Amino acid sequence: MKVNYNMKSKQKKEDSVVIPEIKITKRKRIIFLGSEATPFIATGGLADVLGSLPKELAKNKSLDISVILPLYSSICTEHRVNFKFLTSFNVSLSWRYQYVGVFFYKYEGVNFYFIDNEYYFKREGSIYGQYDDGERFAFFSKASLDTISRLDIYPDILHCNDWQTASAIIYLKGMYYEDEKFRRIKTIFTIHNIEYQGKFGMHTYDDLFGFIPNIKNYIEYNGCINIMKGAIEMTDLVSTVSPTYAEEIKYEYYAHGLEKIINRNSQKLCGILNGIDFDYYNPESDKCLFKNYSFSDLNGKAVCKKELQKMLSLPVREDVPIIAIISRLVSHKGLDLITQVLESLLSQDVQVIVLGKGETSYENYFTHISHIYQGKCMAIIAYNQDLSRKIYSGADMFLMPSKSEPCGLAQMIASRYGTIPIVRETGGLNDSIKAYTGNSGNGFTFKNYNAHDMLYVLNQAIKTFYDKKAWTDVQKRAMTTDFSWKNQAEKYLELYSKCF
Ligand code: GLC
């Protein structure tokens, strides 16, 4: 097998690309593979990225942008009724021979293809965490490649995301390379979170994935199959979702065992900070808000705060700072720092709102605290888009002290709504939030993973809150920080142009 890392040598004259204007002379096709994308199916930040980056890229008329997704039964009918059946065929996965249906939907300039197989994707419960996730996503990855050849939509770049679609790179580079059209495709693998690698027992190598023997060295790691590791080794380029995280994952503390592999492939690695969908998260037009507002007129934000307090049975007071936490309730979000000092924080004149779901111990903890501190703390154990935006707009501060954070989108959304982020300097939090210094900065930050360092900056923020002029200035800086996809999509384009 041959993995070609020397992409420049293959670049043809008529395909020439100029940076920084990034002038592309021939229309290029890019296909994203992913396991979730808004507005069709979402469990986390990956869905936001796959729902908004392709849309931004599709504005560039020299690009043809597609996304391939599984056709989960939980995709809501509102969109589903628009899907058009294109074709069906069978795909082989080891000894299995499975049905593939392909549906199509053009949405916001992007070609969406949906892979149908009811055995794999018509399930109750979450889209992840099924007993056969390895098989389901291997099927999806292979079916996506076969869809590309069936429909003759060979891309210039196949952009895979996280372990669920990493095996598409392994199949493509390791088993489809005899087909000239597949061989020409360059691959990019984006790591949204290195914690989830797709590890399986060696017995699944042939029996489940149907991998051939001579690529075993790429895929095997510590006596297991490691799909993410295989993709990192075999892909043309690797990216991750912030420059700081791209550095952090070279170290054991952040890499969940893959630091050696990351270091060995560091010449292929770069970090590009995610953006957020500025049309969707817009305080001037967001329909979930009690009242719309903008950075030049924050009066509506005061109404949002008042209505939020009413709705959550908190005393309606403008002069008390509301600190919000909207997060999956899992430990890498830094929740043990919060549990250590929350009661001490609540002994002050503050209101705390928690929205999220996750590990039972954290759910129980926050429920318990909100019973003890009624009128000061309110925990809502749920995932609720509408309520989250009422909180983003009605709160004053947004606490996100993650232990690790590949990018993080919540701090950007909070900023957009003029709610000041208080974050630990890690991953994308470090790249997006700059510490308040008096006349600069769009948030409050601390470095060490230490509860009292966090409490210290929280108190700095509370003090600043009472200085009306200083606080309005930070709010304006936060609201005008450009977290849109516009500039970030240009960076992806620069990355793609290394492959054209
Ligand atoms: C993962 C990461 C998060 C990132 C998101 C989108 O969920 O944990 O930090 O923002 O992917 O890339």
Image: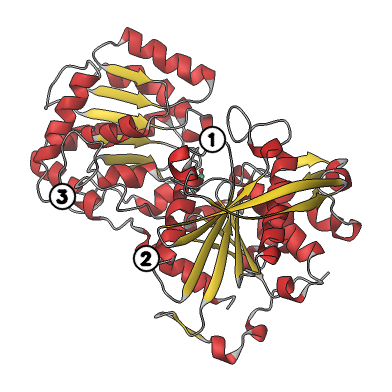
Judged by depth in the image, the label closer to the viewer, 1 or 2, is 1
| Mark 1 / mark 2, whichever is N-terminal | 1
The reply to whether residue 73 is in sight is: yes
From the viewer's side, name the closer residue of 52 and 189.
52
Q: Residue at x 37, y 42 (%)?
A: 410
Q: Is mark 3 within 8 Å of ligand 1?
A: no
Residue 61 vertical placement versus 384 (above, below): below
The quadrant holding residue 419 is: top left
Classed neighbour count for the residue bearing mark 3: other residues with Cα under 10 Å, few (<14), some (14–19), many (≥20): many
> In the shown orientation, is residue 378 left or right of residue 46?
left
Q: Residue at x 22, y 45 (%)?
A: 283
| Quarter of the picture holding the N terminus | bottom right
From the viewer's side, name the closer residue of 184 and 115.
115
**Residue hosting label 1:** 74
Q: CA distance from mark 3 to mark 2?
A: 21 Å
Judged by depth in the image, the label closer to the viewer, 3 or 1, is 1
Q: CA distance from mark 1 to mark 2?
A: 33 Å
The amino acid on which the numbered mark 3 sits, given as a three-letter code, is Phe
**Residue hosting label 2:** 487
The amino acid on which the numbered mark 2 sits, given as a three-letter code, is Asn
- Residue sitting farthest toward the right: 213
Question: x, y (%) of residue 15?
Answer: 55, 86
**Residue hosting label 3:** 295
The reply to whether residue 260 is in sight is: no
From the viewer's side, name the closer residue of 422 and 482.
482
Q: Is mark 1 within 8 Å of ligand 1?
A: no
| Mark 3 / mark 1, whichever is N-terminal | 1
| Mark 3 / mark 2, whichever is N-terminal | 3
SS at mark 1 in the image: loop
The amino acid on which the numbered mark 1 sits, given as a three-letter code, is Ser
